[in-house]
Image (cartoon, rainbow, N blue to C red):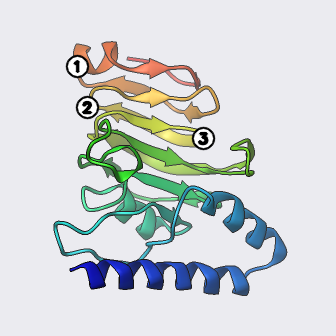
Amino acid sequence: MRFKLILMSFLSLLLVGFLAACGSNDEDQADENTANDTEETEGTEETEEDVVTTASLVNEPDAFVNAVSENGTWIIATLDDITIDEDVVVAGEFYDKDDESSDIYRKIAPYTQDEDHNITDSFTITVPSLTVQSENLNFQGGTLQGDVIVEANGFMLDETATIDGNLKFANEEAESSATIDGEVTGEIE
């Protein structure tokens, strides 16, 4: 089991290095900046219960949908704008930095950052709707273009983020536990 974990970590790092070597200078910088907090796992299917999930860097619609699923990762970072033609559901229980002794937490981060964690570039995720079923989801540093339906408690819209659409809460508890510091261009219901 430990060998599998070490092998998966090594292969993930090897894949990140290969992708960084194949990209242009701009992409190399974006990968390096975001990779400070994340590791590449896109396209990796984990079947063992005790395998530690790492963060996903996603640039394709299918990879994003998989990363936010209940079999996805605790943090999902994008390095470019993404357009998804179907409704998306963010589901599953995840922990801050994937540490089960930490608080339940999940983050969507459509941005790159420097070594001091300052946002250097922000991106847009376009969907018809995004339904939040994961508790304590933090949307930070970019724009979600489409409607957001919050069914879980603890939703956070960071001051660096925008919902270009409506924000709807499924119930009073979800609404009262939410923190909306960012901009919502549509209605908040």
Q: Residue furthest left?
A: 49
Q: Quadrant of residue 11?
A: bottom left
Query: Residue 109: x, y in percent?
Result: 55, 47
Disc 1 from disc 2: Cα separation: 7 Å
| Residue beneath disc 2 | 151
At a point 80% along the width and 78% down the height, the residue shown is 24
Neighbor class of circle 1 (other Cα within 10 Å; few <14, some 14-19, many 20+) is few
Q: Is residue 153 left or right of residue 64?
A: left
Give the numbered dot on residue 143.
Answer: 3
Q: Earlier in the sequence, mark 3 or mark 1?
A: 3
- Look at label 3 and name its amino acid: Thr
Near-viewer residue (128 or 99): 99
| Amino acid under disc 1 | Asn
Outermost residue, front direction? 2
For disc 1, the marked residue is 171
Q: Residue at x 32, y 61 (%)?
A: 72
